[in-house]
């Protein structure tokens, strides 16, 4: 038996990186998975690779109507969504004084609005079924601050807070809501934020306790645990996978 047998999952940002890794793990563990993303070609290719228990759906997570249609489509194809992974996210680097409002809004719309709209879209079906697991991808920037990422940090703190509110409101219906806080993970998020420039992040990895960056598959394993019934008494909590980045303080050396 698979750890997700009988579950229907919708994963945003599923075309690559952490979302794609989660989609692979979910299908392998018996779930039927909706891969949602704006990267149509990559998403369709992955869905074809994963077979009949997966399909790709274009979804701009900042669009309210697209969320309604995506959840309805998922329900028609596979049944009610019982697992939501709010993974879609974007990053922007800029000092506070140089951050344009348009860039700030762009980050908030995807990272924060997308999470809110996703939870709101799946909640009625989960309430009717009296079960469900929502996993919101935050970041270590949702726990502590870093320079140059004011919009991203604001959005990830918001995800952390929304997770706790949703957990309080939905718990009585058998729905669990948790946040995951990755550290530096080897994906395309950083190069995308830098306009396609490839950056050697190994030096950053050397600064954490485990002396390396994380891999998307490692985050997928944590998300899998939270999506499964193995985490049946976990809700409103923060699950950190950062190689030890947040264990220290500013005076350490």
Image (cartoon, rainbow, N blue to C red):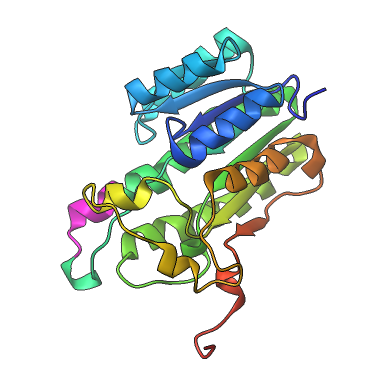
Above or below 147: residue 22: above
> Is 82 displayed left or right of 203 in the figure?
right
- Whether residue 244 is in magenta: the answer is no
Query: In this orientation, does residue 103 appear?
Result: yes
Whole-percent x, y for residue 8 in the image: 64, 21
**Residue 129 falls in which quadrant of the image?**
top right
The location of residue 208, given as percent across then percent down, is 54, 71
Magenta stretch secondary structure, dominant: helix
Left or right: 113 as drawn, with respect to 107: right
**Which residue lies at the image location 20% right of the left edge and 63% below the top edge?**
99
Q: Position of residue 107 (x, y in %)?
A: 31, 50
The part of the image, by quadrant, that contains residue 52 is top right
Residue 82, compared with residue 147, is above or below; it is above
The answer to if 100 sits in the magenta stretch is: yes
* Residue that appears at 37% across and 25% down: 42
Q: 150 or 66, which lies in front?
A: 150
Q: Which residues are magenta?
A: 99-106
Q: Position of residue 235 (x, y in %)?
A: 72, 49
């Amino acid at each position: 038996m698979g750890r997700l047998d009988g579950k229907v999952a919708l994963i945003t940002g599923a075309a690559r990186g952490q979302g794609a890794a989660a989609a692979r793990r979910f299908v392998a563990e018996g779930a039927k998975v909706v891969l949602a993303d704006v990267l149509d070609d990559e998403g369709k290719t992955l869905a074809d690779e994963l077979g009949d228990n997966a399909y790709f759906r274009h979804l701009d997570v900042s669009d309210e109507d697209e969320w309604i249609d995506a959840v309805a489509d998922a329900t028609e194809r596979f049944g009610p969504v019982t697992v939501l992974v709010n993974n879609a996210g974007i990053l922007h680097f800029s000092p506070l004084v140089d951050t344009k409002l348009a860039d700030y809004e762009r980050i908030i719309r995807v990272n924060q609005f997308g999470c809110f709209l996703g939870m709101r879209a799946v909640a009625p079906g989960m309430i009717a079924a009296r079960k469900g697991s929502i996993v919101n991808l935050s970041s270590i920037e949702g726990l502590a601050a870093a320079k140059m990422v004011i919009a991203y940090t604001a959005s990830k703190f918001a995800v952390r807070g929304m997770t706790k509110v949703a957990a309080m409101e939905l718990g009585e219906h058998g729905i669990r809501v948790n946040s995951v806080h990755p550290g530096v993970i080897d994906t395309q998020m950083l190069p995308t934020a830098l306009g396609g420039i490839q950056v050697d992040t190994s030096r950053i990895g050397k600064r954490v306790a485990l002396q390396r960056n994380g891999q998307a598959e490692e985050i997928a394993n944590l998300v899998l645990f939270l999506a499964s019934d193995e985490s049946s008494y976990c809700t409103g909590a923060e699950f950190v996978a950062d190689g030890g980045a947040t264990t220290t303080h500013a005076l350490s050396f």
